[in-house]
Image (tube, helix red, strand yellow):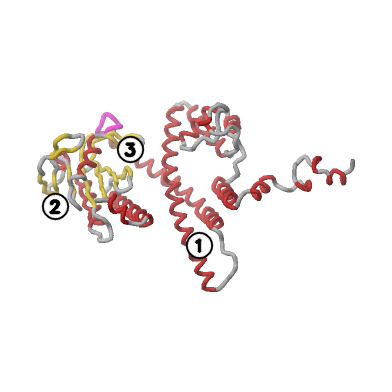
């Protein structure tokens, strides 16, 4: 059988490519067979990851030189759903699915190599991986939501331009615009992530050093906790359109972050219609509360807000804060009047002389029994 005969016989084509074309790429053929939406998602994924997924979980573990269970543990710690697992365990996904890249191999290898140096154990390394995963998951959702808004703006501009010019030329699709944005912001934003992490790490170490000078337990500190809450948010959200609710919450969080940072405080978390913050000085915490009321409650375009402050020992762990002052600050917002600050007795004692305090009638506060809230105003 000669070469011509081989070309005419598809069964003799070892590559399985129609027509025996050795230059055709099986991945290209798969992408052509996929729906337009799937193909666009595949191109976006490749642009973000830098390569196409070509490995199974078992192959990642083998190349990284770790047990498959260790690789799965790291994958879960980073907050990703399992793509595969044991043959008889449906909860682990589909065995042998291709969904990983060489970067995944490097990540698993680096994590367990770090633990192997002896300074930290595997459990500590996995805890750090979980912290990274939770933080990056929220950041990615936030970034995508922001970019989707920008893509919609670009689409509207393209339609308006085409309509004004009477052009019938095909406009860039949503996937093409998304790819362009990924290419434009990729490198610069990645550098910004590392820079910001280093700055926050330095600030966290400085806070730890300050605490070590005054506290025996490095996880516990005496601080003032603030809780800012939008008044009647549930009723307000029922009256607004979804886009308007999102814009309002984003502006609320943005202004609260700005005010807290201006008074050397730290936002611990945002919970939709409320923000939890910390300050190591009751006076600065009070000025923070006043600032939040000024930029939100005094703005006619924004809803009213209430702020509660409580001071005492709190536990700092895993980027969060726990303890009676946290609960008290949240409870106090329920008894505060609109655009007012209510504090507990301990905070009132710590405030500087430019503030006047007035004890309010005792009332039941869930989890604390009868409590005498304290109203505060400038002297």
**Location of mark 2 (residue):** 378
Q: Quadrant of the N terminus?
A: top right
Spot occupied by residue 252 in the image (x, y as percentages of width and height)? 31, 53
* Residue 243 horizontal side relative to residue 32, left or right: left
Which is more N-terminal, label 2 or label 3? 3
Between 365 and 242, the one lying in front of the other is 242
Which is more N-terminal, label 1 or label 2? 1
Spot occupied by residue 36 in the image (x, y as percentages of width and height)? 60, 53
Q: Which mark is residue 320?
A: 3
Kindly state the secondary structure of the residue where label 1 is placed. Answer: helix
Q: Magenta region, mostly helix, strand or loop?
A: loop
Neighbours of disc 1 within 10 Å: few (<14), some (14-19), many (20+):
some
Q: Which residues are magenta?
A: 213-220
Spot occupied by residue 270 in the image (x, y as percentages of width and height)? 33, 46
- Give the number of the mark in front: 2 or 1: 1
**Location of mark 1 (residue):** 155
Q: Marks 3/2: CA distance?
A: 31 Å
Kindly state the secondary structure of the residue where label 3 is placed. Answer: strand
Q: Which mark is residue 314?
A: none
């Amino acid at each position: 059988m000669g070469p011509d005969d081989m070309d005419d016989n598809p069964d003799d084509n070892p590559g399985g490519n129609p027509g025996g074309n050795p230059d055709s790429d099986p991945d290209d053929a798969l992408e052509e067979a996929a729906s337009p939406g799937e193909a666009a998602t595949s191109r976006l994924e490749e642009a973000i990851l830098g390569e196409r997924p070509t490995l199974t979980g078992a192959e990642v573990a083998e190349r990284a030189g770790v047990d498959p269970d260790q690789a799965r543990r790291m994958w879960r710690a980073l907050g990703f759903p399992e793509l595969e697992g044991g043959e008889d365990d449906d909860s682990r996904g589909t065995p042998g699915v291709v969904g990983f890249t060489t970067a995944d191999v490097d990540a698993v290898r680096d994590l367990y190599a770090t633990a192997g140096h002896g300074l930290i154990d595997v459990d500590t390394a996995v805890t750090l991986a979980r912290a990274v995963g939770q933080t990056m998951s929220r950041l990615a959702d936030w970034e995508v939501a922001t970019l989707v808004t920008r893509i919609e703006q670009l689409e509207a501009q393209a339609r308006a331009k085409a309509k004004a010019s009477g052009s019938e030329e095909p406009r860039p699709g949503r996937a093409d615009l998304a790819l362009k944005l990924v290419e434009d912001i990729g490198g610069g934003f990645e550098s910004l992530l590392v820079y910001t992490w280093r700055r926050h790490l330095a600030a966290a170490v400085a806070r730890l050093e300050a605490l070590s000078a005054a506290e025996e337990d490095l996880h516990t500190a005496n601080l003032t906790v603030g809780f800012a809450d939008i008044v009647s948010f549930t009723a307000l959200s029922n009256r607004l359109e979804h886009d308007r609710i999102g814009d309002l919450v984003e502006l609320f969080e943005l202004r609260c972050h700005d005010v807290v940072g201006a008074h050397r405080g730290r936002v611990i978390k945002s919970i939709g219609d409320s923000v939890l913050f910390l300050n190591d000085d009751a006076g600065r915490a009070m000025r923070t509360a006043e600032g939040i009321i000024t930029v939100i409650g005094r703005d006619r375009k924004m809803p009213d807000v209430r702020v509660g402050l409580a001071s005492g020992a709190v536990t700092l762990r895993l980027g969060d804060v726990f303890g009676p002052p946290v609960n008290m600050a949240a409870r106090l917002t329920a008894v505060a009047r609109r655009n007012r600050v209510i504090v507990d007795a301990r905070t009132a004692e710590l405030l500087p002389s430019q503030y006047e305090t007035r004890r309010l009638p005792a009332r039941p506060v869930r989890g604390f029994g009868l409590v005498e809230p304290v109203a505060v105003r400038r002297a």
